[in-house]
Structure formats: structure tokens, C-alpha cells
Image (spheres, grey):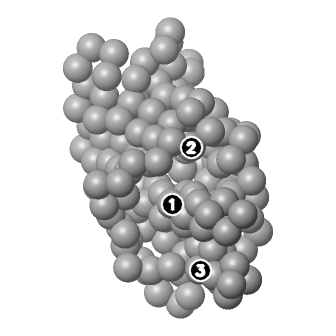
Amino acid sequence: MLNKRKSGHRVVGIVLILLMMVAVTGCGGSRPSSDPRSTPNGTLNELQRAIRQSDITAMLGCYTDPYYVTIDYETTEITHDIARIAYAIIFAAYDYSTWSLVDRSISISGSEAFASCTQRMYFEGEWVSASAMYRMCRVGSKWYIYEEIGTDPGYDFSPSGRMKGLAT
């Protein structure tokens, strides 16, 4: 039971770090007039909009199920069911209305894309940022994030940081 708690806290922490990474404003590029997710940049724009509005359903619509989160070279598989719980906790604890993806650089090769961005967010009286990278794939006419890659930004944005005392 203790291992499940530690594992759950790790997933929540990873999801929070990922949210922080995704939170930085606009990665550039043009927004298509028909389907906003018809380009990798459009999918990142939709992700940013969903996170700023704490819209978990719209946010998860930008990701494959499952998707992968790689933080400091350690990869974790995240299902939408687990992410839905973690994001509900995160959005209840923090204001993501300033979260954005900035300094976007996107490369596309066939049905694969790689985006490098900086996540920015106003947190506890200061602007914080962290690098974020997204591996994406095209399924039909839409682009989905299948892996989010980042480094620990040095901030503990996660409710799991506050819940560590509860696990002991």
C-alpha cells in the first residue's frame, strides 16, 4: 500500500511539472481557420487554452491515451483516467490562468512532430519557467501529444509535495 501511495504521489508530481512546462504562452506559428488541432502548433494552442481554463477534458483531448511523461530521463506512462484525477487536484490547488508556452520551435517530419518550448506561469508572486518538449503524432487530421519531456524546474508545484507528510 505504501508503494502505491508513493507511485501515486510521483504521478501527481510528474503531472504538475508537466503542467508547469506546458503553461508558458504561445509557441508561435499560425492558427488554422478550420480545425485548431490540424497542426502541431494548433494542438499546443488548444492545450494552453484548456490549461488556462482548467478544462481537463479539453486538455486530455490533446494527448494520446496513454501518453508518456519523461522528467530527467525517467519515463512514466500516464493514462487519461490517472491524469484526470491528478489534474483535478492540481487545478483545485493552483491558478493556471497565466500558464503559457513561449519560444516555440516546431519541426515536422511526415506524421511526427517535435516541439520545444518554455512554460511560463505566475506562481506565488513571481514568474517561473521551465523547458518543455513535446513529441506529437498525426492521427487522421489531428495532432496529438504522445510524450511530454522536461526537467524538474526546481519548484514543487505539486500537491504531492504537500501530501508527503500524509504518506508517513
Identify the element where label 2 is drawn. strand
Q: Is residue 167 above or below residue 136?
A: below
Residue 129: x and y, percent? 38, 71
| Residue in view at x 56 percent, y 33 percent | 66
Q: Which mark is residue 14?
A: 1
Name the quadrant containing residue 54.
bottom right
| Residue in view at x 54 percent, y 50 percent | 48
Identify the element where label 1 is drawn. helix
Crowd around label 3: few <14 · some 14–19 · many ≥20 (10 Å)? some
First of labels 2, 1 by sequence position: 1
- Is there any visible trace of residue 162 in the rendered image? yes
Identify the residue at the far top of this view: 140
Q: Answer left or right for 119 relative to 90.
A: left
Amino acid beneath label 3: Gly
Q: Which mark is residue 93?
A: none
| Residue in view at x 41 percent, y 39 percent | 147
Q: Nearer the viewer, residue 1 or 14?
A: 1
Q: Answer left or right for 108 relative to 48.
A: left
Q: Answer left or right for 64 relative to 134.
A: right
State the residue position of label 2.
78
First of labels 2, 3 by sequence position: 2
Amino acid beneath label 1: Ile
State the residue position of label 3.
161
Q: Answer left or right for 98 relative to 133.
A: right
Q: Is residue 27 above or below residue 110?
A: below
The answer to whether the residues at label 2 and label 3 have Cβ atoms under 8 Å apart is no
